[in-house]
Amino acid sequence: MPKEPNKLVRPLAVVGAFLLIIGGFFAMYFSSKKTTQQQLNAPPPQQVLANTPAPVAPEPSAPVANPGQVPQTPPASEAKPIPGSQVELSSLRARVWPADSSVAAAELKSNHLLVRFSAVGAGIASLRSADHFETIKRENPVDLQIEYSTPVFDIAGNPLKTAAGIPLTTIVAPMAALGLQIGDQFINLSVDAAGTLWKFQAPGTFTAEIADSAGTTALRIVRTFSLSADGRNLVLSQHVENLTNGPISFRLYQIGPVDLPMDAATYVGEKRRLRFGYILSPQYDPTQSFVQSRDYVLEHATVLGTKLANGHYEESVTEWPNALSKDRQYTLSWIGLTNRYFGVALHTPITPGAVGGQLIGEKPLKSVQQVDRLVLERPLLNGHPNDVVALRLTSPDTTLAPGKSADFSLALYAGALIRSEIRTDPAGKALSLDGLVLYSMPGPCAFCTFNFLTSFLLWLLTFLHSIVHDWALSIILLVVVVRTILHPVTKWSQVRMQRFGKQMAEMGPKQAKLKEKYGNDPKVLQAETAKLWREEGINPLGMLGCLPMFLQTPIWLALYATLFFAAELRHQPAFYGIFQKLGHPTFLADLSVPDNFWVFSQSGFQIPLIGAILGPVTAINILPLILSVVFYLHQKYLTPPTTTQLTPEQQTQQTMIKWISLVMFPVMMYNAPAGLTIYFVANSALGIFEHKRIRAHINKHDLLNLDKIKAKRGTAKPGGFFARMQELVEQQRKNAEAGGKSISKNKPKR
């Protein structure tokens, strides 16, 4: 039997999309808080420690012994290897050099990157953007990679301390060398309490020597940092040279990229991700030329994994190779880490050739065999977890002949997640590093933001900006274009919903009589109700009129995600910066943050219950208030007047819907980026205009005249899709009834 009509079908359908997005906020946030490790990774083999812990706060009275228990290293000297001499491999240690303060002062610069070095493992202390800043005043370049310090814990998870009670700390520098594994011996190349293990030569060359107890040098490691010709890649030219008269087998461990700093705006939670670029197996890509990344979008919480019983994370987890890459025979090409607007990708150096513009360099990342996740536990940031993921790289087993050297060179692309900029870089284009760019909200809503939709919407937004040269106007025009494209579907949906609602309102008394007459026999009641529907010319599929509205939801979610993650909107003012020209420095000065009509605090305060999702409130924002007014008008014009008396339950339901749309949604949008709020205001305002046009069209053509509909249905030619569907349903019902009668007739009597 058809269900009683719902008098609130239309408002429920309209607000349903709002509820879906609100639910998406909570789903995205709690998804970012989950700590369940995907079963994507194979169990990690036993590995060396992340690096040798470096005590940064020793007792004043005496230096603290290295907690890593590194044996005494050979004395620093300029001793050269003696040709043909025998080296005692069991006593190999990295040579210690006097500390060199010039390392901290050295730097590399380009139009896009600023690099400073670290003595820890000959890594980098900071990698900063030269063309993107933390504030709209172009203050403080954006940090893309920074050196971290983290406490040292024992096996039980307790922090280690010096005799004076000072906590021991490990320093982790991006792109730092950790050491060499030679047989059963691990040669530390990170830090030493007695000095530095790397000899520095400006502008960016580090040299380490590994010698035996007699001072005979066995291996020399040279790391030279430079910037690529376009200034977007930090290139690490790295070689290991065998200075003995016999072969040496080893494995190189180093730190790759580490997490980008957490976004200052914590709206909808964590947005950092781990990505992998890979080449398909030769079976599917015989040329081994196409780099893809779609199979690996690992959210930050997933990469962290679950904390152990001791309250700390598992020491290391192997992220590559994993079960998926092994099963499909993927070849690693690059390793990427991103936050909302910026990303880094480790890859093989790719440079333009001198002849014909051909590129020099290989797409597979052959110098990295395994990638392990390490966790640097950090204090909370604005009440949010701020643990940092560092990636440890393991080279393939390498056997080096006497006098030969092995190349372990790497390059790190770093910059904003803007596809057009990435594609201008030779490595970015060759390795498809634009795969780092992903306009997808974390959590269950990710599947709704189809990549082809976001790519098209961003292209359209950029095209509109090239015409009007203002991002806020481009967003409004984008909404106009999308609503125009979807207008036929919207009109069809609204006409069907209003028609079905009116039909069901007129059917109410007749269905009540049928229920009173046949209420004790559900099968007869169902048959009579279906007969009444046919007589009245009501199509059961009319109740699906709201379905197209929900089918449009992925488009609006894709538009939402595109505007949220589009780095092009960062630090861009709205409406040609008119408010700044009128003397208001903060209002709509940056479309990637709230409108900031009146900034009253730098730290702000948290709203109870939802503060963890919205982040701290630091300003009075007026766009969400405007959004609430527009929602009220939208609901007033969009919801048709009811033709029947509402029950108390329905009145309560309608009141709840109004409160959700008028209060809760604007509250959830309070700390949203101004570009998103402009999008919602424009979308709702245009929805009011569109609905008035549709209602005028309905009145003009008398589309809700039920007598006219019945007459038209009586003269209509059969064979329409919905008619065929209705006939099929009716035929199935008759067959089921006939089958039931046949079974009861042939049933033997007892």
Image (tube, rainbow, N blue to C red):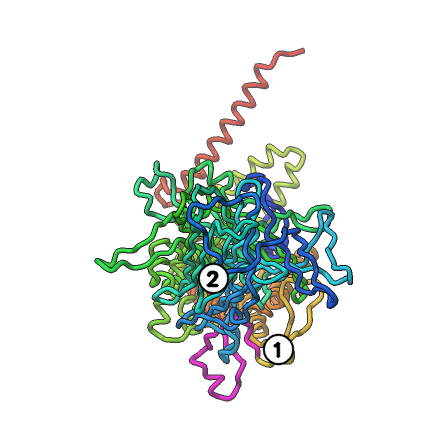
Q: Which of marks 2 and 1 is nearer the N terminus?
A: 2
Taking the spot 59% from the left edge, 40% from the top edge, the residue there is 46
Residue at the extreme right: 164
Q: What residue type is labelled 2?
A: Phe
Residue 288 pos. (x, y %): 33, 44
Q: In this view, does 46 lie to the left or right of 724?
A: right
What residue range appears in magenta? 571-596
Q: Residue 206 carries which label?
A: 2
Of marks 2 and 1, the one in the foreground: 2
Measure the alpha-carbon separation of dots 2 and 1.
51 Å
Residue 81 seen from this side:
yes
Q: Is residue 471 left or right of residue 25?
A: left
Q: Residues within 10 Å of mark 2 (few under 14, many from 20)?
A: many
Question: Do residues under tags 2 and 1 come within 8 Å of each other at their CB atoms?
Answer: no
Residue under numbered circle 1: 620
Residue 443 seen from this side:
no
Quarter of the picture containing the C terminus is top right
Secondary structure, mark 2, is strand
Q: Which of 404 and 47 is in front in this view?
A: 404
Q: Which amino acid does label 1 sit on?
A: Ile
Could you tell me what secondary structure mostly forms the magenta stretch? loop
Residue 411 higher or lower than 38, as above or below: below
Residue 57 forms part of the magenta stretch: no
Residue 726 higher or lower than 257, as above or below: above
Q: In this view, does 304 lie to the left or right of 694?
A: right
Taking the spot 55% from the left edge, 35% from the top edge, the residue there is 527
Residue 572 forms part of the magenta stretch: yes
